[in-house]
Image (cartoon, coloured by chain):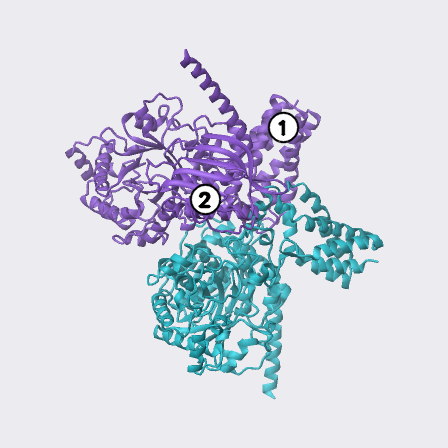
Chain colours: A purple, B cyan
């Protein structure tokens, strides 16, 4: 009976707490949302006397983040801090922000990243077991920066926080388009700001080999267009990531996606007598390493032995995806080899290859990670399965992630986190790794976390950030925060703030929109185009580059579609308003809707004033039909009715807007149709 | 008599040509303006079939720039080129753009950078002696990109071009604020786009030692805050510059500006028993190397011997400026040393030091360059004098530049090119190195050119580009183009286009304004602040940082003044309009003036709608008085008269606007006063 009462109390308390936390989530723009948070009812003013003290061993990480904290705090408030650097606790017993931790964290899946944060009017304290926990806490504190008309301050709260998953990653593909060290560093900083801890570096693919090899200089001489990382640069990135508490997992994708390797070493290919040239298109290509050739393993062992020390992490990704085996099928020798070794399918042959690779990697002290195709019946469970295929690929609920966990593999999820598909963050945020699938405790523990994947066929360094951010911050929350943190509207509200704050790290996701629009207009007034970008989104799920041949690696990526992003801002609001209005119409909603329609109805006039070029001409139908459609709906809303001829005109406008214009989708078209149906 | 006729013909022809060129300068936005240009009357369409062929030895430089040319061309036109890379002339006999050159250029002051360019409807050819000449020609061709409603094309011209001066440099100070490799690379690209050829790298100063030393790791361990370049990074920057035809001159500033060195090695200082800490303020400081200590020379010889191979250029800058000798005066041992060596003044002692340095550098195959303080009577004329003091420092006409040339030194000019002083480009553009000073041919030849100097006490990497560009492009023209190219209005027109085009190289000079304004408003609507930035300029000539102690290296540089630039755009136009109107008033001019006044009179309403913070509050008086003043003048202009009480109100507004607001100057205040005097 006592137990039951206790249970009831606990349930009530939990539900109360959850309700309280929800209320706080409207108030504070923290992302990822912490596990436990309470208000202290006080504020901590940010003055020029603010100082930070550090109490703990091996202060490199905390010094780095605390110094960056001071710069960012000063930059966003304009407060001229007297002290520009943190000091040791011994030197400053009365610091405003006191950081205490016990030990240096290890960059591994068993590291403790928990922290406690307390902010009162007399100061802030961050307490953690590890330095990495401490820097996670500093990022939370920075997100508590607030102001009124007279001062800046930190909101007073008590937080106890820790991640739900140990693997919270971002993959960046540097093969399809190369991204320099500075581009990676700013993305690492952005990752750290939302507590992500794994950078998965997709280093080679058909379009380029991006790692210096002193053993095989031909790889970059012949297959990189001069765009690759030196060993020193890799060490620099890895060291930078380490300071931010981020592990770096390299990926050397084999045996498929091998055009770059085979451009340098055609003799390792599965198609004898062929020469290869670097791929300029996108897609899945045939060039594949020959798994029956001993030289293939000599090459890979030498290569991996050379690069392994550059990447201290114990995990090493060998790709292993999308090998369709065409060149294997066409090669008699390979077919004979399969028979001789009792390998029935190409999958069996690839497993044969993978197992040999795993041995090489184990010798180097590495665990093998591979995309989920490597999960064949004979693949040892020591491998980590990177799940990229799920229900959307026709697999059962949970996809290969759940399957892998049940079969005994450690596993990470990327299905649902493919940010390069340009889908709404709502979809990614709703991707719950485990959901209501019943798993044992051991199976659950094998689900290490997940990774957002940024394939860069359609992203140069100029647009990369706008494809990754801010959506990845919400994926970071999905992987750090509790499963119960899932209020979509609240997430969107907080994401807007994170989006803006990411800019202080040098990210270009916001500012490069105007750059591209200035380019398109040849430096004319960009406001009419800006209005269009706020309701247009790039075509999704690889529709932009049908068959992978519309865009080559060197095609222009400074076009209108490149200025647009997923979750077009005005469309997000407008579509919500229309939904509200058609379910329960109010005058206020109507006014807001009409303001948007007004904006769009006038936009074509502004657009028409621009001196036209071929690029601008291509936007003409979109701009014109949008304004005409908006005018007609406006007319209809004003009188609540629309003549049949106007309705027909509107239909024509909408049918044009639905067409594929300059690789974007006008994402208010459905709302326009809904409104038009609403008119008499 | 024949001679006279010939002379008359030549004069007439030159003047005709000059007139014709002036007409072309209104038509084409080339910068720097070429030596000779004629129209072919044809255009060359830019289609997807466009190709480039290269005919010449050692194609690394031309390949690099030609590939970048194709990306930029495709990016700015949206044309999907079939061929993404240049090929050799053998492989493609019918290329659209044919590049021919004879030999690899040398990165030296004797290199030939001339080129000829011809554009007709059938193609373009670039002919040069060296690869560096060829890439200069490619930049010119890219500046000829044009369009109409149906196509993109190159304007048809014939150009024969070569530089007036061999040394056209930009100095960047990476000591006061550190700037990463990527920041330097994008500035190198910008330099190459306007044909500059010397990057002067100011690597050490009181605020930081920015070069890895394997001999003396204490230098960066103790005196860099972890912000420095590794040897690999230096090699990377130097190689990148070389590809762009840019020489790299390192500066190790000694014996003054030595706080960083002495933080690591106090025993080399002139103040025995002192310990030093890295300087956080700006200005001229006492810490100075001890020139009487043999260990000083051992240290410098070891250091220079280590770093010299990183910098293949034969010139090596030792600074030598602003040593006020206070620590020497206070040091008895040093005073005795002077007596013993018959060194009467501290200048003599410094020359003693410089001569010893020159010997060390000569052994390393380097020529010494130093700021003009090194030009003492006993300094050998083998040194290069870097002139930074001129008439504005109380020196005779031509300053130390002319003096140095007359005394037999090779010399370069920076007086007049101090872009960090935030003065108008008009002033820099009017800085004619030789002017009408009479010099012998030999003396003239000793004037190698000049350098824009970007000291970065007040510039972080976020604002650096906006301090350097676009003004440096006009300085580049001053140093490349003929002396006769000096039409201010025409330069300003062309500079506007260059300014926009520089953005395609990733420069942040335009886009970071909005970033800072979003920061200041905490992501509110920035348009009212943007309007203010277009008439406000940062305080000039170091007034912003009085005594060097208002701003420390870690102070916030994301303030309103950081969003402002020299040559505020609306002020430039408005001030010109007011001048026109007050000299010869027309209704059209009046309308234009009133449009601006209208904009400003309404701006305070928009500003008032922002949620206020301490930063925004600091802008209140500026915004309010601007709107009130604009309203009053508008009222006056409408009725051509203003009541006495209104005049008094206006006077008050203007006196507030003239005050020092948030470190900016409201640069339309004088025009307002002029207008107000114009009213009855």
Q: In this view, does A196 lie to the left or right of A521?
A: left
Residue B67 percent across, percent down from the top left? 42, 56
Q: In this view, does B409 lie to the left or right of A178?
A: right
Residue A468 visible in this rendered orientation of the protein = no
| Host chain of mark 2 | A
Residue B481 visible in this rendered orientation of the protein = yes
- Who is closer to the viewer here, B294 or B654? B294
Q: In the orientation shown, which residue stands out farthest toward the top?
A: A1
Instruction: Specify whether disc 1 shares its chain with disc 2.
Output: yes
Q: How crowded is mark 1: few (under 14 residues within 10 Å), some or many (20 or more)?
A: few
Instruction: Please name the residue shown 57% across and 51% down the image.
Output: A522
Mark with earlier residue (1, 2): 2
Q: Residues within 10 Å of mark 2 (few under 14, many from 20)?
A: many
Q: In this view, does B441 lie to the left or right of B337?
A: right
The quadrant of the rendering that contains the C terminus of chain A is top right
Q: What residue is disc 2 on?
A: A464
Q: Is mark 1 on a helix, strand or loop?
A: helix
The quadrant of the rendering that contains the N terminus of chain A is top left
Residue B285 percent across, percent down from the top left? 50, 65
- Picture quarter containing residue A288? top left
- Picture quarter containing residue A205? top left
């Amino acid at each position: 009976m006592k137990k039951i009462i206790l249970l009831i109390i606990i349930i009530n308390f939990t539900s109360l707490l959850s309700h309280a936390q929800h209320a706080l989530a409207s108030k504070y723009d923290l992302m990822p949302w912490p596990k436990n948070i309470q208000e202290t009812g006080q504020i901590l003013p940010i003055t020029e006397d603010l100082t930070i003290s550090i109490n703990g061993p091996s202060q490199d990480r905390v010094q780095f983040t605390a110094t960056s904290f001071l710069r960012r705090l000063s930059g966003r408030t304009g407060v001229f801090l007297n002290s520009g650097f943190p000091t040791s606790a011994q030197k400053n017993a009365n610091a405003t922000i006191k950081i205490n931790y016990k030990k240096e964290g290890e960059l591994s899946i068993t590291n403790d990243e928990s922290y406690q944060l307390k902010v009162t009017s007399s100061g802030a304290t961050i307490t953690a077991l590890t330095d990495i926990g401490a820097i996670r806490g500093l990022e939370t504190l920075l997100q508590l920066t607030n102001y009124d008309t007279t001062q800046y301050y930190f909101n007073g709260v008590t937080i106890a926080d820790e991640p739900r998953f140990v693997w919270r990653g971002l993959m960046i593909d540097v093969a399809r388009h190369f991204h320099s060290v500075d581009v990676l560093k700013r993305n690492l900083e952005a990752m750290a700001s939302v507590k992500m801890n794994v950078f998965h570096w997709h280093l080679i693919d058909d379009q380029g080999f991006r790692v210096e090899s002193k053993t095989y200089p031909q790889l970059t001489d012949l297959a990189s267009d001069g765009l690759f990382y030196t060993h020193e640069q890799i060490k620099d990135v890895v060291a930078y990531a380490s300071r931010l508490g981020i592990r770096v997992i390299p990926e050397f994708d084999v045996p498929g996606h091998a055009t770059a390797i085979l451009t340098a070493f055609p003799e390792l290919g599965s198609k004898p007598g062929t020469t290869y040239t670097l791929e300029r298109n996108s897609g899945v290509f045939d060039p594949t390493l020959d798994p029956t050739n001993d030289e293939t393993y000599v090459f890979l062992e030498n290569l991996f032995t050379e690069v392994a020390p550059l990447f201290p992490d114990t995990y090493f990704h060998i790709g292993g995806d999308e090998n369709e085996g065409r060149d294997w099928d066409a090669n008699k020798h390979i077919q004979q080899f399969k028979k001789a070794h009792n390998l029935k399918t190409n999958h069996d042959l690839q497993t044969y290859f993978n197992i040999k690779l795993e041995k090489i990697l184990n010798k180097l002290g590495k665990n093998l990670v591979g995309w989920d195709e490597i999960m064949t019946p004979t693949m040892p469970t020591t491998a980590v399965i990177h799940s990229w295929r799920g229900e959307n690929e026709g697999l059962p609920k949970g996809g290969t992630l759940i399957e892998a966990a049940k079969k005994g593999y450690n596993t990470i999820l990327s299905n649902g986190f493919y940010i390069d598909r340009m889908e709404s963050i709502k979809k990614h945020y709703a991707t719950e790794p485990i959901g209501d699938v019943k798993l044992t405790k051991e199976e659950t523990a094998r689900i290490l976390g997940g990774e957002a994947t940024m394939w860069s066929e359609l992203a140069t360094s100029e647009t990369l950030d706008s494809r990754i951010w801010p959506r990845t911050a919400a994926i970071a929350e999905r992987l750090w925060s509790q499963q119960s943190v899932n209020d979509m509207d609240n997430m969107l509200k907080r994401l807007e703030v994170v989006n803006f704050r990411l800019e202080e790290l040098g990210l270009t996701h916001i500012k490069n929109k105007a750059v591209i629009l200035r380019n398109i207009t040849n430096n004319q007034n960009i406001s009419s185009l800006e209005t269009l970008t706020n309701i247009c989104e790039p075509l999704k799920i690889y529709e932009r580059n049908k068959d992978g041949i519309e865009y080559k690696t060197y095609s222009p990526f400074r076009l209108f579609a490149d200025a647009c992003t997923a979750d077009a801002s005005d469309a997000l609001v407008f579509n919500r308003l229309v939904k509200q209005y058609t379910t329960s119409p109010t005058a206020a909603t109507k006014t807001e809707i009409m303001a948007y329609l007004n904006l769009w109805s006038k936009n074509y006039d502004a657009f028409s004033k621009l001196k036209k070029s071929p690029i601008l001409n291509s936007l003409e139908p979109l701009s014109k039909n949008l304004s005409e459609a908006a005018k007609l709906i406006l007319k209809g809303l004003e009188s609540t009715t629309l003549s049949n001829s106007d309705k027909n005109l509107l239909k024509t406008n909408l049918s044009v807007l639905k067409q594929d214009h300059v690789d974007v989708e006008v994402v208010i078209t459905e709302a326009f149709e809904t409104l038009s149906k609403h008119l008499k």
